[in-house]
């Protein structure tokens, strides 16, 4: 059963990475880290141009966050 959890987590991380790579291509996407804490899950995104990831007034990062929560 533990092997199945590892495979599921790996697939989930890969899907998130592919989604972020597609969405943040113009921002120079360089990778991501997922940290699970008792308070929630934190996704750290590495990019050449973080301003494009955040967007004007945080609009882009909020849209990406909502999309990741829903899917």
Image: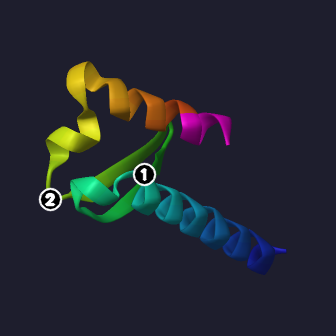
Residue 28 vertical position relative to residue 68 in the rendered view, above or below:
below
SS under mark 2: loop
Helix or strand or loop: what does disc 1 sit on?
Answer: helix
Membership of 37 in magenta stretch:
no
Question: Residue at the location (40% across, 48% down)?
Answer: 43
The magenta-colored residue range is: 67-71
Residue 38 is at least partly visible in this image: yes
With respect to residue 44, does 12 lie above or below? below
Q: Quadrant of residue 21?
A: bottom left
The residue at which mark 1 appears reads as 23
Mark 2: give few (<14), some (14-19) or many (20+) Cα within 10 Å: few
Q: Quadrant of residue 34?
A: bottom left
Q: Nearer the viewer, residue 18 or 8?
A: 18
- Mark 1–mark 2 distance (CA, rounded to whole Å): 14 Å
Give whichever of discs 1 and 2 has the lower sequence position.
1
Q: Which x, y percent locates residue 51?
A: 16, 39
Relative to 4, residue 17 above or below: above
Closer-to-camera residue (4/46): 46
Q: Quadrant of the C terminus?
A: top right
Seen at 51% across and 38% down, the residue is 38
**Circle 2 sits on which residue?**
48
């Amino acid at each position: 059963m533990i092997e199945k959890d590892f495979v599921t987590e790996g697939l989930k991380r890969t899907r998130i990475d592919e989604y972020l790579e597609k969405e943040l291509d113009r921002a120079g996407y360089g990778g991501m880290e997922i940290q699970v804490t008792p308070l929630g899950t934190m996704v750290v995104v590495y990019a050449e141009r973080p301003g494009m990831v955040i967007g004007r007034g945080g609009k882009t990062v909020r849209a990406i966050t909502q999309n990741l929560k829903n899917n």
